[in-house]
Amino acid sequence: MVLRIFGLSFAVTVISLIIAAIYGGPQAVLLVVILSILEISLSFDNAVINATVLRRMSEFWQKIFLTVGIVIAVFGMRLVFPLVIVWLASGLGPVAALDLALNPPADGAAYFPDGSASYETLLTDAHPQIAAFGGMFLLMLFLGFILEEREITWLSWLEKPLARAGKLDQLAVIIAGALLLITAAYIAPEDTVSTVMIAGVLGMVTYIAVNGLGELFNTPEEDEDGEPVAGSTGGPTELAKATGKAGFFLFLYLEVLDASFSFDGVIGAFAITSDPIIIALGLGFVGAMFVRSITVFLVRKGTLSDYVYLEHGAHWAIGALAVILLVSIGYHVNENVTGLVGVALIGAAFISSILRNRRTPEPEPIAAGERDDEPEKVTVG
């Protein structure tokens, strides 16, 4: 099973390393490996969240996400998106932006006589609005999870009071809006305040719109007595899946979510290299493929059901990433910190899940005739 799930990722890795060796020699191979590790460490929480959504999708939409979605992730977010940012930020045409990316002059003199910009600096200058959009989208995702009452809680001393507070209507929007105002007023550079506010509001609106469209086709799960299950508003029923509409909106949701996670990795990659080909090979072809494989593995193995706190840990990691993105608008945050925080939270949730499983042994199967609700057999005659 492991080979079947990760086989394609290993094959893509080998091909990518060969391309890197031909393109830039041993140094390029080393950079691709480093970027791959960076992407996987930064996006492991993304894989866990993807798995929680993917398991609710029909087989058709799962295949769409794992085929069309990977194309969007690899080419769209890791290669095309940075070029579009440079294109829009610089005023250069698409061809000139691509040329600047592939042949970056040290001082940008080829396109900027005063040496005021280069491909890397143009993309870095766009970081405030990128971080504001992605940070607010992820923050809304975190708040939507943590402010909802759930039967199982991980950090009960904190999650239960937050869930009770979450009964206040639109509390997530209130908290997110307040943090956006604080970010714009006290963290963002003065010349970026308006763009940060606009990008942040767009991030919130995007989450509300995509999540709301999904809820249109979402029916709460029911228990054996037909009563709604608490906290079961996270996915469509089989009937909703059959229509395909719920799957489509969940697909859109996953793509926006993946984009929000990708922002940090793409910007962080420039601390290692500014070559877009190396970035695409490391973050996209190798890193994104392995993140997809981890997602599929979690779904196929039922890992989220076996280790019930993993989803909680991933959402806390998302909350941490959202705060880090907002802080990074005004202050540099080392990429290692971002990756380690996520890994630490998910690792702690995994260990907590193991301890919980040991404390709660599986119930033994009940033999026929031992059930209290089984009717007695009556012998006639």
Image (spheres, helix red, strand yellow):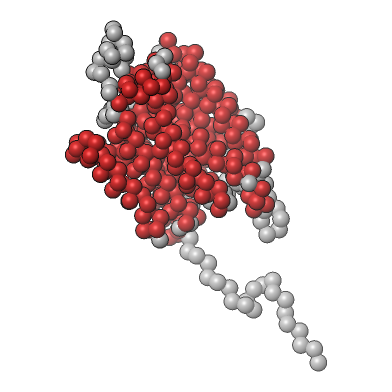
* Depth check, front residue: 20 or 233: 20
Looking at the rendered image, the quarter that the N terminus falls into is bottom left
Query: Farthest front residue?
Result: 95
**Residue 373 x, y percent position in the rendering:** 69, 71
**Residue 75 x, y percent position in the rendering:** 41, 35
Query: Farthest right residue?
Result: 381
Above/below status of 226 relative to 289: below
**Residue 182 x, y percent position in the rendering:** 48, 18
Left or right: where does residue 146 sit relative to residue 44? right
Above/below status of 47 relative to 195: below
Q: Residue at x 55, y 48 (%)?
A: 61
Left or right: where does residue 345 sit relative to residue 15? right
Observer able to see residue 213: yes
Q: Residue at x 48, y 16 (%)?
A: 195
* Depth check, front residue: 159 or 264: 264
Q: Residue at x 70, y 53 (%)?
A: 227
Above/below status of 206 relative to 226: above
* Depth check, front residue: 116 or 148: 116
* Depth check, front residue: 344 or 94: 94
User: Quadrant of the rendered structure where residue 4 is?
Assistant: bottom left
Looking at the rendered image, the quarter that the C terminus falls into is bottom right
User: Quadrant of the rendered structure where residue 269 is?
Assistant: top left
Q: Residue at x 53, y 70 (%)?
A: 364
